[in-house]
Image: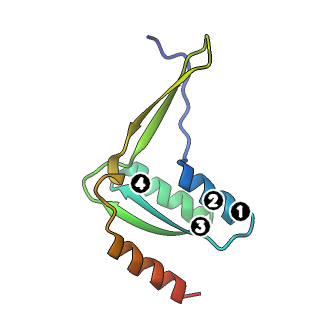
Amino acid sequence: MKLQRSCRQWGGKGANQALAAHKLGGDVIFVTSLGSDSAGKNLLKYYKEQSLKVVPMIAEGTPTGSAMIWVNKNGGENCIVINPGGQIGCLHLNWFSSQILRLLSER
């Protein structure tokens, strides 16, 4: 199989929804888990440029999660390949809860 075209875009369902709500004027706090790689650093930079409030959980030594969507040009069927990266094993709810409470108290 030969790749004919590719593009890379920031996203993920949660990130896309958080940014859309923020851009529409919502008071949004986006809680996310990222790897400690350049993709995670670039995402945090992008969120900051967009003025989105973020509570990041950084998984040290782990890449940021990603997904590839392969689309068959002859039928439009797709296959999604997921690399969960920093999202696996990083849901420390107590840590997230304390960070969210801190942000809420700053309002």
Q: Is residue 84 left or right of residue 54?
A: left
Whole-number angstrom distance, CA of label 1 to CA of label 3: 9 Å
Tag 2 residue: 19
Label for residue 40? 4
Disc 2, disc 1: CB below 8 Å? yes
Q: Which residue is mark 3?
A: 52
Q: Is residue 37 above or below residue 66?
A: below
Specify the amino acid type for callout 4: Gly
On the image, the x and y values in percent for residue 74 come to 61, 10
Q: Going 59% across and 62% down the picture, which residue do you hit?
A: 49
Residue at the spot x=53%, y=84% of the render? 104
Q: Residues within 10 Å of mark 2 (few under 14, many from 20)?
A: many
Judged by depth in the image, the label closer to the viewer, 4 or 1, is 1
| Element at label 1 | helix
Residue identified by numbered label 1: 23
The reply to whether discs 2 and 4 touch (Cβ–Cβ < 8 Å) is: no
